[in-house]
Amino acid sequence: MNSIINIILTFFLFIGFEKIWFFFAGSFFKNQIGPMMNMNGDEIDVRIPAAILVYLLMSIGLYYFVFVIKTPISLFESFYRGAFLGFTVFGVYDLTNRAILKVYPWEMVMLDMMWGTIMFSLISSILFYIHSFKIY
């Protein structure tokens, strides 16, 4: 049961962090890859079912690779394991886009990979913190 709670918590942390990220970086995305984005006027029109699956997969992956395989023994360990996973996941996504799409600028690759690294490391750290105090 704790695994399901952790995955659900991780899922909502991802959504929260991404909402904040798109608030600040949404215009950058529109400027860089706007013609390829699903837009409704000036707003990004997110396809909710696909977004849910993305966040669910990232939540399961983070929880499994950072906490299940070997429980981290420190905040730093959970931070760097999350950072490495985020760098890898976002790197595969961004570099694949750079390789196959006509327009996917290096600035986009670098910024998004940085964001993935930061977001995964912060969420891993939050989960470690919650686990260390046995909040639930």
Image (cartoon, grey):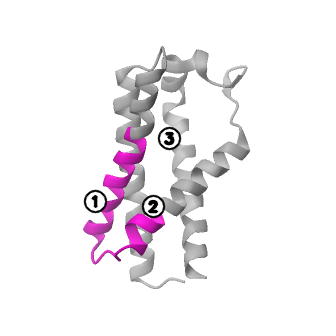
The amino acid sitting under disc 3 is Trp
Tag 2 near tag 3, CB within 8 Å: no
Which secondary structure lies at badge 2? helix
Earlier residue among tags 2 and 3? 3
**In front here: 78 or 17?**
78
CA–CA distance in space, label 3 to label 1: 21 Å
Q: Is residue 57 above or below residue 103?
A: below
- Residue 85 in magenta stretch: yes
Tell me the residue at 45%/76% (across/down). 130
- 129 or 103: which is nearer to us? 103
Residue 9 percent across, percent down from the top left? 57, 67
Assess whether residue 113 is covered by the magenta stretch.
Answer: no
The number of numbered discs placed on residues in the rendered structure image is 3
What type is the residue that disc 1 sits on? Tyr
Q: Residues within 10 Å of mark 2 (few under 14, many from 20)?
A: many
Residue type at numbered disc 2: Leu
Q: Is residue 25 above or below residue 11?
A: above
Q: Is residue 79 left or right of residue 33?
A: left
Q: Which residue is mark 1?
A: 80
Q: CA distance from mark 2 to mark 1?
A: 12 Å
* Residue at 34%, 75% in the rendered image: 70
Which dot marks residue 62? 2
For label 3, the residue is 21
Which of discs 3 and 1 lies nearer the camera? The answer is: 1
> In the figure, is residue 110 to the left or right of 17?
left
Most common secondary structure along the magenta stretch? helix
Q: Which residues are magenta?
A: 62-91
Q: x%, y% of residue 25?
A: 49, 32
Position of residue 134 in the picture relative to residue 74 (left or right): right
Give the numbered dot on residue 6. Answer: none
Residue 111, quarter of the rendered image:
top left
How many residues crowd mark 1 within 10 Å: few (<14), some (14–19), many (20+)?
some
